[in-house]
Amino acid sequence: MVVVHVLYHGGMALKRTNVYADDSDLLLIKEAAARLGVPEAEIIREGIHRIALAHRVWDEPFVSDEETFDLGGPVDKEEIRTAVTRGHAEQERRNRGDAA
């Protein structure tokens, strides 16, 4: 295990913190940074930002009750598959200029 010193930001000045990271994770970060041509710190900052957003608690729901609709009950996988397949086929017909 290695201690990594990280500067992170949330739209303001960067702040320094200590993070313990496994050697294997650090190797993956090093490889990704080399492949992308960016500093390792940029990969680490992006990871911190993404996980912070993933665990964010929102004050309001993303969709209000007025923006939803009742499907009349549970919808199973086969019904979804059938609807998607039908919609895709209809889109393909429209793209070719065929009548529905």
Image: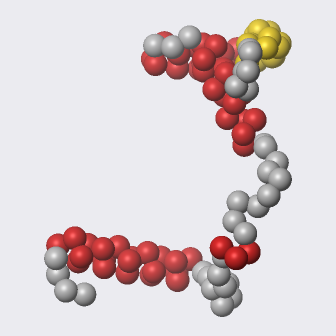
Quadrant of the drawing holding the N terminus: top right
Q: Is residue 72 above or below residue 57?
A: below
Q: Is residue 12 left or right of residue 34?
A: right
Residue 48's quadrant in the figure?
top right
The residue at the far bottom in this view is 72
Q: Is residue 92 left or right of residue 57?
A: left
Q: Residue at x 66, y 20 (%)?
A: 44
Question: Is residue 69 in view?
Answer: yes
x, y (%) of residue 47?
66, 28
Q: How many marks?
A: 0
Q: Is residue 5 left or right of residue 97?
A: right
User: Which colour assignment does the render follow?
Assistant: secondary structure
Question: Is residue 22 in view?
Answer: no
Residue 6's quadrant in the figure?
top right
Q: Nearer the viewer, residue 9 or 6?
A: 9
Quadrant of the drawing holding the C terminus: bottom left
The residue at the far left in this view is 97
Q: Residue at x 52, y 83 (%)?
A: 79
Q: Is residue 11 above or below residue 76?
A: above
Q: Residue at x 82, y 48 (%)?
A: 57
Q: Nearer the viewer, residue 67 or 91?
A: 67
Q: Is residue 26 above or below residue 94?
A: above
